[in-house]
Image (cartoon, rainbow, N blue to C red):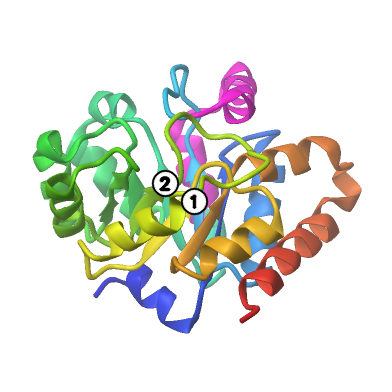
Amino acid sequence: MSRISERFASGKLLIPYIMGGWPDMATSAAVFRAFIKVGCPVIEIGIPYSDPVADGPTIQRASERALDKGVNTDQVLNMIAGVAAETDVSPVLMVYYNLIYRYGIKRFAQAARRAGVEGLIVPDLTVEESHDWRSAAEDYDIDTIFLASPTSSEERLAKIGGLAKGFVYAVSLTGVTGARAALPEYLKEFIARVKSNTELPVAVGFGISQPEQAAEVARSADGVIIGSAIIDLIERTPTERLTRTINEFGAGFLSAMRQP
């Protein structure tokens, strides 16, 4: 069992998503540290990309602004390395496959592991085409975390559940990331389908923006992934209040998720 999988043994996990290098490198590192301090041992960090097909307008906007400032893969990995060296955290990269391919598959795996990265989510990499990456990832002890969607067949869920490592990322809805007013009615049943096809923990993301929604998801899943709501929070919070606001945000979600 990997360190990421073991993290779920302590209880339901809140997994925050941050965009590496946005709104600047120092702030993304500060948010990274703040979420670790509040009690999030697994954190997802995005690498800015020009065509993020799985992301909605909020994360796309953050990605574009980071790219406009010249943020690149090595800068994000250096930021992660600095935080990971001084904290107890399991960083997970969210990265599109073209960045890995252009960097060099083995070279990317080596650089990610050197930075302290323990898992990768590659939303545009299918299980059928994942062999080359998984082989390199295994060489460097990096978990490949696959996404399962509500439209996935039982056969496909079984394949995802069998090849994934760390946890399975259950996408709560069809479409892209972004806050939603309500969760889909089929979500509980979908989570049960994913869990029946894997021995790994299952974390749910896409569309979750309120503590009450996170609490509802946590009754069925092992973890809750929050992305766009965090980007929105950073956008509207003055820099001098950001750490305190992150603490309050994270504590509120964790408290809700731990309610019986």
Residue 161 place in picture, x, y as percent: 20, 57
Residue 56 lies in magenta, yes or no? Answer: yes
Looking at the rendering, which quadrant does residue 244 occupy? bottom right
* Residue shown at the point (26%, 23%) measured from the top left: 102
Q: Which residues are magenta?
A: 55-81
Answer above or below: position of 58 versus 259. Answer: above
Tag 2: amino acid: Leu
Q: CA distance from mark 1 to mark 2?
A: 6 Å
255 lies above or below 114? below
Does residue 11 sit above or below 232 in this rendering? below
Q: Secondary structure at mark 2?
A: strand
Assess whether residue 251 is covered by the magenta stretch: no
Residue 179 lies left or right of residue 221; in this view the side is right
Tell whether 76 sits left or right of 245: left
Sequence-wise, the earlier of marks 1 and 2 is 1
Q: Which residue is mark 2?
A: 93
Q: Are marks 1 and 2 in contact (CB under 8 Å)?
A: yes
Q: Nearer the viewer, residue 259 or 106?
A: 259
Tell me the residue that label 1 is attached to. Answer: 44
Seen at 10% across and 36% down, the residue is: 128
- Frontmost residue, 22 versus 258: 258
**Mark 1 residue element:** strand
Residue depicted at x 63% and y 23% = 61
Mark 2 closeness class: few <14, some 14–19, many ≥20 residues within 10 Å? many
Identity of the residue drawn at 46% across and 24% down: 49
- Quarter occupied by residue 156: top left
> In the image, residue 140 lies at what x, y percent?
21, 56
User: Principal SS element in the magenta part?
Assistant: helix
Give x and y (percent) for residue 211: 70, 60
User: Tag 1: residue type?
Assistant: Glu
Q: Residues within 10 Å of mark 1 (few under 14, many from 20)?
A: many
